[in-house]
Amino acid sequence: MTEQNDNYDPATDNGADTALALGKGLDVGTANLAAAVQNDEGDITVNVERNAFLDIPSDVYSKNMLTKLKVPYVVHNNKLVVIGEAAFELANVFGRETRRPMMDGLISPQEQDALPMMKMIISKILGEPQVQGENCYFCVPAESLDVDNNIVYHQGLFETMINSMGYNAHAINEAHAVVFSELAENDFTGIGLSFGGGMANACITYKSIPCLSFSVARGGDWIDKNVSSVLGCPRSKATHIKERGIDIRDPKSREEEAVSIYYRSLINYVLSNIKSRFESGQNMPSFNDPVDIACAGGTSMIGGFIEVFRDEFAKIDFPIPVGRIFRSDEALTAVAKGCLVAAAIGE
Ligand SMILES: Nc1ncnc2c1ncn2[C@@H]1O[C@H](COP(=O)(O)OP(=O)(O)OP(=O)(O)O)[C@@H](O)[C@H]1O
Ligand SMILES: [Mg+2]
């Protein structure tokens, strides 16, 4: 049973009092959940929450402490549960790790409370549908090349969850959403890449139709895991080094050097896989004009990302002519925005 305390308001920050156009976009990510909604002027608002939670024993002291700190919580299975960004902050204060409902881009098999927790965070950022059956486009990863994963199950779970909230759920590939967000001026032709926490997703489209999509189970978490193992430090330290504003073109310490090495390896791995998949694929359209490559996702936000990407791109003999290589101005929210664009044009 889940109940909500007085502090908790699922409608917070969802822009529910603005007049909204129909259709919403939802980025279901390993690290972050993001919902994109549109107002009458066509402006897009994106609500982001960490995909994490923390449970605390339900005693009177903990309740008082949370109330004093003004931390919203819910009671679930006789425990006090804090969700999203607040869970992340509280975990840092107490030196604990948050629990994560997803792993490597998909619902985590090791986390039995994953679905109810994610449902709470998603209803908070998405809000109620404006009309029953409003379209909600949500992203799913493509099948991975390097691990055996089950996208069908993951997609089915979220379809059911979003439908149960009164929406009409439609799944869209994550990197396809990057194309919708970033390549409108190119008539939705080009390559969209999403470098996330659990995965990297790639999609090549021709006039909005995907002709190749895949994922690799490597992303920010993979970098953190490797950096922590070569440096012999906790993972959270590796994440901190990575996110503290370094430039991978110019590492200033042994630690930054490790981050930089794994970044280059990740980028090279994704590019080589696009190349080999494209060359072995059948029925590929022939791109006569150069196509643009748009990068998005939290992992692309590190300093020097695009320069290192161009560097690695120059080293391989890419099978199609490429024009601009760029990173989205809003790398963390581009996927949610792309899902909303897909909802708006009825992809
Ligand atoms: N400034 C930054 N520099 C480097 N990495 C960052 C930065 N900000 C966030 N990240 C990393 O971005 C990742 C999260 O990105 P994002 O929110 O796009 O992933 P996600 O969509 O939740 O995951 P996935 O798509 O793999 O399921 C984390 O690994 C995080 O450490
Ligand atoms: Mg993502």
Image (cartoon, helix red, strand yellow):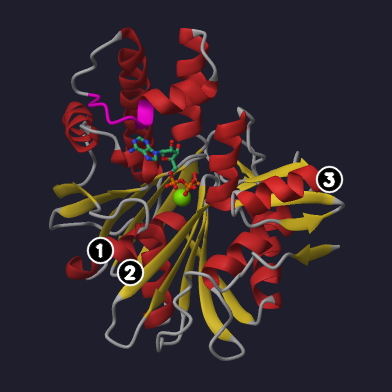
Q: Position of residue 210 (x, y in %)?
A: 39, 62
On the question of residue 58 being in view, the answer is no
Main secondary structure of the magenta stretch: loop
How many C-alpha atoms fall within 10 Å of the one at disc 3: few (<14), some, or many (≥20)? few
The one nearer the camera, 289 or 134, is 134
Q: Which dot, 1 or 3, sits closer to the camera?
A: 3
Cβ–Cβ below 8 Å for labels 1 and 2?
Answer: yes
Is 171 part of what is drawn in magenta? no
Callout 2: CB less than 8 Å from ligand 2: no
Please tell me whether residue 127 is drawn above or below residue 240 in the rendered image.
below
Q: Which dot, 3 or 2, sits closer to the camera?
A: 3
Callout 1: CB less than 8 Å from ligand 2: no
On the question of residue 103 being in view, the answer is yes
Q: Position of residue 275 (x, y in %)?
A: 32, 38
Residue beneath label 1, please?
189
Res. 37 image quadrant: bottom left
Determine the residue positioned at 66% across, 55% down.
154
The one nearer the camera, 206 or 26, is 26
Residue 208 tag number: 2
Tell me the kind of residue under disc 1: Thr
Residue 59 tag number: 3
Determine the residue positioned at 37% across, 27% down.
242
The image quadrant in which ligand 1 is located: top left
Q: CA distance from mark 1 to mark 3?
A: 56 Å
Cβ–Cβ below 8 Å for labels 3 and 2?
Answer: no
Tell me the kind of residue under disc 3: Asp
Tell me the kind of residue under disc 2: Ser
Determine the residue positioned at 53% across, 49% down.
85
Q: Position of residue 339 (x, y in %)?
A: 43, 68
Magenta stretch, residue numbers:
242-248
Q: Position of residue 5 (x, y in %)?
A: 73, 65
The one nearer the camera, 151 or 82, is 82
